[in-house]
Amino acid sequence: MEMMAEARAEVRELGKRATPARLTTLLFLRSQARPASHAEVSRALEPLGFDKTTVFRNLNDLCEWGLAQKSELGDHVWRFEPSQSGSHRSKHPHFVCVDCGTVTCMDQIQLTRGSLETSRDIGKVTEILLRGHCNDCN
């Protein structure tokens, strides 16, 4: 119940209504080890009485308010994750298995000093995406 109270306070601090759907959506994202698609979140929250449209609207609201972030990892599917919760931090690398589509957060990977300097000559790096074969598919 403490997590619910914290989520409620965060939403209210932003001047937004802390509706059950918003809080449940935020807590669901925070409970996941990896980014979740709209379909995955909807499937999980449907038994609680939340329809796909409500879930989609709340996912986008949470992103707009900075409580969540969304990424498109090259497969035309938006995935959502909390912005600042647990081990998640803003904009971190992801690994996508090219066989099964599993997405894994790679919080510990950072660009080297040389890579950062080189990338500054090109532009600002906002996201790193690694593709390959996961251990289950390898």
Image: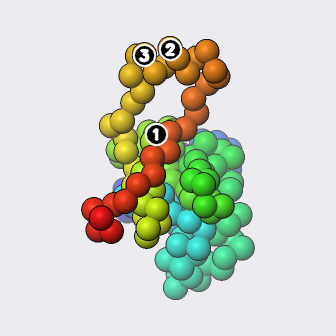
Q: Residues within 10 Å of mark 1 (few under 14, many from 20)?
A: some
Residue at mark 3: 114
Q: CA distance from mark 1 to mark 2?
A: 18 Å
Residue visible at 37% across and 41% down in the picture: 107
Q: Check disc 1 and report its element: helix, strand or loop.
A: loop
Image quarter of the C terminus? bottom left
Q: Residue 93's x, y, as percent?
A: 45, 42
Q: Nearer the viewer, residue 118 or 42?
A: 118
Amino acid at circle 2: Glu
Reply above or below: 99 against 61.
below
Q: Nearer the viewer, residue 103 or 69?
A: 103
Q: Determine if residue 3 is in view.
A: no
Front disc: 1 or 3: 3
Residue that appears at 56% across and 58% down: 79
**Left of 32 or right of it: where is 67?**
right
Circles 1 and 3: CB atoms closer than 8 Å: no
Q: Residue 68: in sight, yes or no?
A: yes
**Type of amino acid under label 1:** His
Q: Amino acid at mark 3?
A: Gly
Q: Which residue is mark 1?
A: 92
CA distance separating discs 3 and 2 = 5 Å
Contact (CB < 8 A) between labels 1 and 2?
no
Q: Quadrant of residue 59?
A: bottom right
* Residue placed under numbered mark 2 in the picture: 117
Alpha carbons under labels 1 and 3: distance apart: 18 Å
